[in-house]
Structure formats: C-alpha cells, structure tokens
Amino acid sequence: MIVPEGILCSKSHEYLLEKENGSYNVGLTDYAVEQLGDIVFIELPEAGSHFTKGEVFATVESVKAASEIYMPVTGRIIEVNEKLVESPEILNDSPYADGWLVKIEADDAQADSGDLLEYNDYKEEIE
Amino acid sequence: MGKRTVFYQKHLELGAKIVEFGGWDMPVQYTSIIAEHKSVRNSAGLFDVSHMGQVFVSGENSLDFLQKIVPQDISKLAVNKAVYCQLPDVNGGLIDDLIIYRLEDNDYLIIVNASNIQKDYSWFLVNKADFKVTIENKSDEYSMLALQGPDACKILEKAGLNTDEQPEFFNIVMKQIKHIPLFVSRTGYTGEDGFEFIVKNEYAMDLWNILFEAGGEYHLKPIGLGARDSLRLEAALMLYGNDLNEKTTPVEAGLKWSVSVNKAEDYNGKNIITEQIKNGCPKKLIGFIMTERAIPRHEYAIYYNNEPAGVVTSGGYSPTLDKNIGMGYVDTKYNISLDSEIQIMVRNKLYKAKVVKRPFVHKNYKNSNQT
C-alpha cells in the first residue's frame, strides 16, 4: 500500500489530498477500508453540490454495515468517482490511487484543516 | 470482553477480526466475507459455532416434556434423527428456534442459540413441572464445529469417516474420529451439504487440526460469522433476534411447514398457532430482491404503494446472486405476494424491490426430503 505524501486524515478516517490549485481528492484511509472489509455499495453526491465540513456527503456499505462519510473540509464537489458505483471493490484494492471518492474545490482548506492529522500522527492516534 | 471458545487463540493466529456476538468474542471474518462465502458455496469451509448451546434431556418423560414445549410432533422422531423446531411461549411468540436430536429412546439433545442459552434453560425448567425428566445445560462442556460445502463429505471421509458411516441429512450419529469421540450431525446453516460436530472441549482443537489436515487438498477455509450470515440469508434460514423474536409466531414467520398440524398433544401457544394456521395472521414474512440500487438492512421500513407496510428483518448483499436481498414482515392486509413490487426506505429514499420465492439460492442438501 503506497500512501501518498502530504495527505491529511480526519479522526473519522477520511483523507484529503491536495491535487492542484485548490482542488483536493477526498477518500477513505487504508485503515478505514481494511476495517470495513468487502465494500459492496457506494453512494456518492452530485457534482456541483456543496458540503460543510463535518456533513455527510457519501455512504459506503460493506457486507456487514452502512457507514456515513463526512466532509473533512468545506467545499464544492467538482467530480465524483463514477467507477466506484459499478465497481465498489476498487475502494478495497486502491483507496488512494483509484478509489478516491470525490474531487472538491475547498472554500478555505487552510482554515478548515486545523484538526486534520498527518498520516503518521493519524496512524498513532488510531493504534 | 465476551466469552471465548476453545478456538479463540487459533482465530487470532489466523488473523481473524473479532466481534462480540451473543455475549461471545467470535471471528467475523479471517480474510474477506465474500471470499469466505464463495469458499463454502464452491468447496468447503469450517465454522467455529461453539457459542451455541447444548442441552441434554433424559428420563422416562422426555418425550412428554418435549411435546409440551414445541409445535412439532416429537413422537414421530426416530432415534438418530433431528428436527428443526421452535420454542413458543404460551402466546405463540418465539423464545428461540432450535434443533432437537433423538439420541436414544429417552435421550435427546437440543441445540439452542448462543444468546438464548440461559433464557431457554430457565423456560425448560418452568415447563419441567412434574415430568420425570433430567435437563442438563452442558453448553460449557462442549464445542461445536460446522463443516459446510459441496466437498464436506469428501473431507470428512479423508478425516476418517467413510461415506457409509456418515449420517444422512438431518441425522446424527455418535462416532469416533481417531481418538476423538463426537456427535456427527448432517445439519448446518448455509444451505449447503455439510456436518456439525459436537465435541467435548478437550478434544475440540484436535478435531479442528484433523479437519484442516484432511481439508487441505479441498482448500478448506475457516469461515467467520460474516459469511455465516450471508450464507444463511441466501438460504432464507431464520436468524433469531432478527427474523424471529417473542412477538413473532411460527405461522407469521412462514414456518407453518415445520409445525405438526395434526399433533394431538397440547403444547405452549397451540391455540394461537392453530388458529393462525386456520384463519391467517396479521403479518407475514416475505423475501425480496432489490430492483434498484440499495442495500436493505435490519429494521429498514418496507413500503407498498408508498405506504409503510412492514419492516426488514434481515438484508444484505448476496455474493452468489450479486444482488441485494432481504426478508421482512409485512401487514397481511396489503395482499403482498410473489412478484409484488414493494419499496424499501434507505436513508430517507424509497427504492424498488420485488417479492420473490425463498430461498434465494437453491439448497444443495444431500439425501434431502426437507427443503
């Protein structure tokens, strides 16, 4: 598992990965995906919709249960990963490279990311 | 921390994820629920089901006692046979569902659900009354393993029990495998052919090792409770606590086939059960397949023509069908029947589903008279 450099993680296991000029990938950490087990269903928001930090923007269901996914920072959805709808197992196989959930344009990532952790600190926190 | 079976350390060694179930710390999965599910459908899997309870009933009034507590006619049960039963209270509501095995003329073994061991045992004592019967809860002395799947029979043969020594479907035999005395029963909870082994704790780990040694060439895998649940759901087998509870009768649960309608003896709940068989009941169990993308789950609402009509009791993804399936109760006033379109409320939205026949996946029992 290659964890991309510079990701920021929430304690509810979402990650934020800066791409270019204020756009970010939002997904679930490898730890979260491992805990969920086989993912069989993903419900994603509409592109264009706007979510506040902490709001539920997606649902990921494993064989056992449905989990709500929270926005790590406030922003607008600019793209959703449609491939996941047909093949939710991509999220198990590749949570960072191919299994990102949405791309967002953050309103003010700087201000919103104060409580997000660098990957190593996040790992320490959950262990 | 919950109770632990003899196999707890083994589960950890195998990398199992542990969850609490019915007061027990049990493996929910070792690798992947879907992979484990498919192993059982395609070859074979071994389940630790030691959390389940064993109650032995003996004495000259054993039969009379059992006749009083279940709607099934136990007088028809021959020695070495097993029968699926329910345990109704006086109002017909279900305290548990169980399997009764006749071991000898007056000796019976009852397998009960893990979370109900104490409740059932107390109920048995209440019903013992003046019957000359000894009721022993030996759940803590016994472990239980389930070997399930199309290759179960061959694996058991390799482990030392030839096919002609193996019990037929819903039969039980007392055998010895190497140095291990045990009960071998041809029952299970997956819809596949297979066996359940009831063995004293001190022999349990040896049995596990023997079975895995024998199962190597058949790719025998340990299977967790996650796949146990998805397998039983595909086979539309009831899960007590989800699909059955004290507010549900056997008739409502679609278990009329298992009730002995001509049983002469009185039993707990008989009035209500026979009345419901004759005149129908207020709710009934249905099975359904989602026709729109959504996963039905326990306690989601069922709608019919946009009106609330019932509740999902079990639901999830079916690895065999690659579809989302469920069971639940609907009010009988809606005349919901096979092929009816219903809706399931998932996160405040209604998704369409179609009522289908149960089981969802054809059962592969051997020597089967029972479906």
Image (cartoon, rainbow, N blue to C red):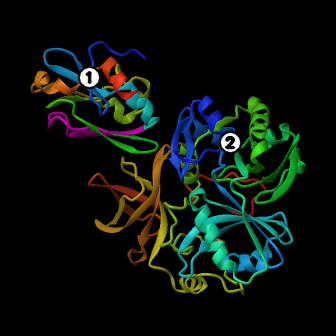
Marks 1/2 in contact by CB < 8 Å: the verdict is: no
Work out whether residue A43 or residue B146 is closer to the camera in this orientation and state it: B146
- In reply to whether residue B147 is colored magenta, the answer given is no
Instruction: Residue at the far front: name it.
Output: B1
Chain under disc 2 = B
Residue B101 to residue B352: above or below = below
Quarter containing the N terminus of chain A: top left
Q: Compared to B118, does A124 lie above or below?
A: above
The dot on residue A117 is 1
Residue at 61% from the left image edge and 81% from the top image edge: B268
**Callout 1, which amino acid?**
Leu
Residue B146 is marked as: none
Q: Nearer the viewer, residue B355 or A39?
A: A39
Circle 1 sits in a helix, a strand or a loop, which is it?
strand
Q: Quadrant of residue B353?
A: bottom left
Q: Does A42 lie within the magenta span? A: yes
Q: Within 10 Å of the Cα at label 1, are there few (<14), some (14-19), or many (20+) other Cα atoms?
A: some
Q: CA distance from mark 1 to mark 2?
A: 41 Å
State the residue position of label 2: B6
Counting other residues with Cα less than 10 Å from the Cα at mark 2, is it few (<14), some (14-19), or many (20 or more)? Answer: some
Image location (x, y in percent) of residue B34 = 53, 38
Q: Is residue B71 visible?
A: no
State the image coordinates of residue B192 (x, y, percent, origin top left). Answer: 68, 49
Where are the magenta residues, as a range?
A40-59
User: On the rendered structure, is A95 left or right of B119?
Assistant: left
Question: Going 62% across and 73% down the picture, which residue do you hit?
Answer: B123
Label tally? 2
Q: Residue furthest top?
A: A5
With B5 as the anchor, is B158 left or right in this view?
Answer: right
Residue B154 % position (x, y): 80, 40
Q: Position of residue B108 (x, y in %)?
A: 78, 67
Q: Given this view, does label 1 or label 2 mark the residue nearer the observer? A: 2
